[in-house]
Amino acid sequence: MPRVTWEDMAPLAPIPDRTVRRREHPPPTREAEYKAIIVKVNDICLQIRKFAKKYLDRKAVDYVECDKCLSELLRSWEMDASDFKTWKEFLEKLKFREIRQEVRESESCKDLLYICDRAKAFELAIPGIREKLVKCTREHLQKYCKSFIEEMGGLDIRPVFDYDEALKGYKADIEGKIDQINTNILTYGELKTPFDKFVNEGSVHSSLMEEVCVAVVEVSHAVKKWVSEDATYPDRLLQEIFFNNSYKENLEEDILRLNAKHRDAERSLERKHKTFTHLHRQHLSHKKEKKKLKSSLETVTNKIEKLERQERQRQEEISGLHSTLRDKTPRSHRDKEELGLKLGRTEENLERVHEWKSVSERQQARLERELKQVSDRTYELKVEAVTVRHEEDEMKNSLLGIEIEVKSIKDRITSIEEKNVVLKKIRVLKLSPDTLRMIHKRRIQANGRGALEDACRFVAQFIGKDWKRLYDRLPFAPARDTDKRQKDVFVIDQISARRDRTPEETAVTCLEKWRNFNRHGDIAQLIKGLRTLNKVELAEKVETKYMVTNVYS
């Protein structure tokens, strides 16, 4: 790779890797990559410390005196300040120009040479340091320090999510500092010319150098912290697994406790149901007895009313007979005897009615007492039955609540088990030394024919009418002689003319035929054919788009 000069740097864009990668090699293990990243940032910090110790930690430079020294030298050389655009031209002129001894030994002249030496060291070191830093963060750190958050699916696993957010924070912080470095480099590039202004404003570019060095060290420390965070990530996942297992055991104990409570509640519910059934039977029995007593009491009451009517009738008859006997109307002896006998019989009947009424009233009083007792007991049984039924309903609701709680706990246990499966999978992916190689191999397999087809369609957009020449230069396995290739081109051309196809569509058909006849065709062979056709720019585009890819893509 050619050295990237200060003038050719593009600070706001990633440093391109122009190395032609013919084959994709599997990436190293995670531990090896950690070690390589730490070695790189330590080397960067060492270079920055050496530069700072030599050029930034010395005594203050009097830039005004340096500017006066430069003006004096220009007068002695009979030159103008515009003759020197940068410090390089000034140092080149020093090789051929004499400086008086007293001027050379002056402090301002030494500082002037020191400014040039510092600028030279800065411009030689910083591009390489920046390139290493960008490559380390973008092509290594962001590739290997991965949270595997895509493995979560629809689950909410807090450590994985938090670590992924931390990675985004690290990335944003590092990218921000790299942008700051780029901005300071651009500002420095604007200040370096003309040379007299560069010397006069030495404090400005000195501050920019210091800011760049500080930013580089901060990025290096952020990289080390990121690597340390990534190295402890599997331990945090393991702690989450242990916590989930402990929480799962507590939930299982809660299920056992709730199941025991559920069994006790079922037994209590069964006893309550038996009690309710017994009370309900007694209530029905007393209800029937109450109905029977009511009927008997009603019969006795009707009988008493009937006897009372008979009693009133007898009393009226007796009163009538007494009135008849007291009457002065002369009657025969026989009539008087008959009235006397009738009065006696009526009085006897009245006595019998009194006795029957007395017996009926005693029956009525007894029935009323029994009815009251039965009614009270029936009401008591009803209240007890309703109370037991309410208690039974509460127990059923309690059982339902226990079942819902058990189901909820089981769902939580299932969720914990699913999370643990994902956590273990992510931890294995993170710890396994073959993870990156496995993903690399899977990507290579996935990028087989499908990627080749996409690459062919991409090439067809730009190859146009040159598809015939390209078809003649593409390799075939097994080999296809010239006559057959010419016949293929003739057939494709005839069909395209008949169907009025565009050159792009014809090129797609041509490359499809090449893929059908070439059993071991790949993107590398397509790129080789394009280079043979002198389509170098298109070949580089295909290589960048379909071969030089991120290992996690």
Image (cartoon, helix red, strand yellow):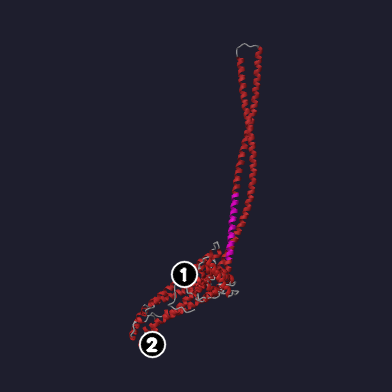
Question: Residue under circle 2?
Answer: 96
> Relative to 277, is 553 on the left or the right?
left
At horizontal 58% and vertical 59% (from top left) the residue drawn is: 412
Look at the picture and state if 134 lies above or below 296: below
- Provide the secondary structure element on which disc 1 rests: helix
At horizontal 64% and vertical 48% (from top left) the residue drawn is: 271
Q: Amino acid at mark 2?
A: Phe
Q: Amino acid at mark 1?
A: Asp
Along the polypeptide, which appears first: circle 2 or circle 1?
Answer: 2
In this rendering, does residue 443 appear at all?
Answer: no
> Relative to 165, is 252 on the left or the right?
right
**Where is residue 482 drawn, in percent x and y?**
57, 75
Question: Residue under circle 1?
Answer: 173
The answer to which image quadrant residue 510 occupies is: bottom right
> Relative to 278, is 499 on the left or the right?
left
- Provide the secondary structure element on which disc 2 rests: loop
Disc 1 crowd, CA 10 A, few/some/many (<14, 14-19, 20+) = some
Q: Which residues are magenta?
A: 396-424
**Where is residue 307 drawn, in percent x and y?**
63, 25
In this rendering, does residue 371 appear at all?
Answer: yes
**Where is residue 387 drawn, in percent x and y?**
60, 44
> Relative to 498, is 269 on the left or the right?
right
Whole-Å distance between the Cαs marked 2 and 1? 48 Å
Q: Is 370 in front, or is 155? A: 155
On whether residue 410 falls in the magenta region, the answer is: yes
Total marks shown come to: 2
The answer to which image quadrant residue 29 occupies is: bottom right
On whether residue 154 falls in the magenta region, the answer is: no
Q: Is 463 in front, or is 429? A: 463
**Where is residue 123 drawn, in percent x and y?**
43, 79
Q: Is 430 in front, or is 75? A: 75
Look at the picture and state if 294 lies above or below 81: above
